[in-house]
Structures are given as C-alpha cells and as structure tokens.
Image: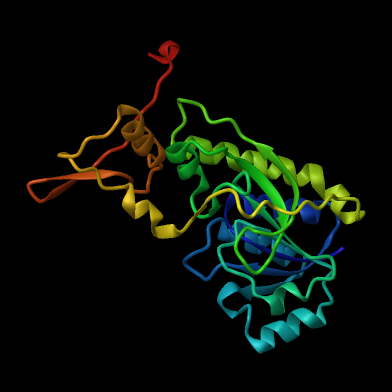
Amino acid sequence: MRVVFLGNNWVGWQVLSYLVEQGEDVVAAVLHAPGKRTFEEELVGEALREEAQLIGAPDLHAPETLGLLRSLKPDIGVSAMFDYILRKPVLDLFPQGCLNLHPSYLPYNRGQYPNVWSIVDGTPAGVTLHYMAETIDTGDIITQKETPVSPYDTGESLYRRLEEDCLELFKKTWPLIRTGAAPRMPQELDKGTCHRVHDVDAIDPIDLNATYTARDLINRMRARTFPPHSGVYYDVNGERVYVRVQLLREDEL
C-alpha cells in the first residue's frame, strides 16, 4: 500500500517502523514542526530509509504540499500521536481513508491528555484505531481495547501502558486494514468526553483553604505525576510548591 505517515513520539516511531518492516510503500512522512518532535532522529531515519518525502506538519495544508501529496497517489493515511488537525482537502487525498491511533477509549477522552482524565474523571482508559474526520477523534471506530486503570497508576505509568496497547492494537489490526476486511463502527457522539490542552490548568492548582475529598485530591496528584511535567502545585507566601506522588504496593515497601 502507498502510505502517508503522520506522527510523532515513541508510538509514531514504532508504527512507522512496523509499516516499513511489512513492506508498505511509505511515500511521505509528515512530522511535527522542528522543536516539537520527539524521537526525531528515529522517525527521520525510518523515513529516509524508505526514501519518503519529509513534510513539516505546519505546511500540510499549503497548496504546494497538497499538490505534492496528490502526485504521490497515496492509498491511505496513518496517523499516530499526530497533534495537528487534518482538514477535508488532506483527508480527501486518501481513497482508503486516513486512520488515527488514539490513546483513549473513544468516545471517552477525545482530545488531549486522556491518561490524565481517565484517572481524574474515572472514565474508561484504552486505545482506539479509527478513521479520521474533520472534527477531533469523532470518526468511525475500527477497533479498540480497554486498558485497566490501577490504583497504583500515575499519569506516567498509565501513559506507558497506553503506548504499548496502541502498538499492539495497530499490529493486530493492520492485516485486516490492508485487505479491506476491517470493520467500521460509527461512534456514539452524544456520549463520551472531550478535553483540550489547557483543561489541565483547572486541576493543577491546589487551594490550601478549599475542601476536597481524599479520593479527588489523590487522583489529581497522581494523574499529573509525569516528570518532567510540572503537575499540581500550591502556593505558600507567594512561592509555588509542586507535588509529585509515589504509589507503592505493600510488597514494595
């Protein structure tokens, strides 16, 4: 298949590597803007190994970029941890659609930081492979897997398990996609939850004079424990104090 890859981060790198290993023809790799890329060396290395066109995400909707992508005659798009919205002119380039691998159990936690909100809100955690639509994380679902949330989870530990589950789900499902046998299930868009990047700004400050349940306060602290991110904090005499938690089983003491 002629694939346009769009991605970032460890999951993006692993998905791109898998596509290359499977012998797919990765004709272009769309990467985050310089300075916003993680695992940049690995992603670029895989793309160059395939002699794929390297495209910067900020240029994706430019007329010349659309023309270049159209000339490559892609069959399908594959997005993994890609933080840019795809508009109709890009989505229309792919006869077999554009897939997105999202670390949430859609329709719950559309958007950003699903690992945080599954802990804070108690919503199901998981991973979903779905077709992309113009609105964020609303396209038809191909398949998904629920990821149990442990009482010992922090935002970081849950995120790492979601990464592993993303890759496992993609590898398991790709053979069905390339043969046209993958299912397609509309989302129940009247259900679920959605969060933006700055929604965490409302849960990070702790008011020392406020009343919280112990459950809610601990969940906020553990959900936002993900070094090097700063996480929750409180102010004392004008000084900001940041909080990270360590959660141990009894046999780890």
- The picture places residue 19, in percent across and down from the top left corner, at 78, 55
Q: Is residue 237 left or right of residue 92?
A: left
Q: Colour scheme in the image? A: rainbow
Tell me where residue 134 appears, x and y as whole percent: 65, 69
Image spot of residue 96 (x, y percent)? 84, 65
Judged from this view, the residue extending furthest toward the bottom is: 63
Residue nearest the observer in this picture, 29 or 172: 172
In the displayed structure, would residue 165 be above or below residue 14? above
Tell me: residue 34, above or below residue 68.
above
Residue at the location (87% across, 48% down)?
Answer: 175
| Quadrant into which the C terminus falls | top left
Residue 70 in which image quadrant: bottom right
Q: Position of residue 188 (x, y in %)?
A: 67, 51
**Residue 152 in the image: above or below residue 53:** above
Rendered residue at 68%/88% (across/down): 64
Direction from residue 116 to residue 96 in the image, left or right: right
- Which of these two is toward me, 212 or 63? 212
Left/right of residue 243 with respect to residue 2 in the rendered view: left
Q: Residue furthest left?
A: 237
Identify the image quadrant of residue 127.
top right
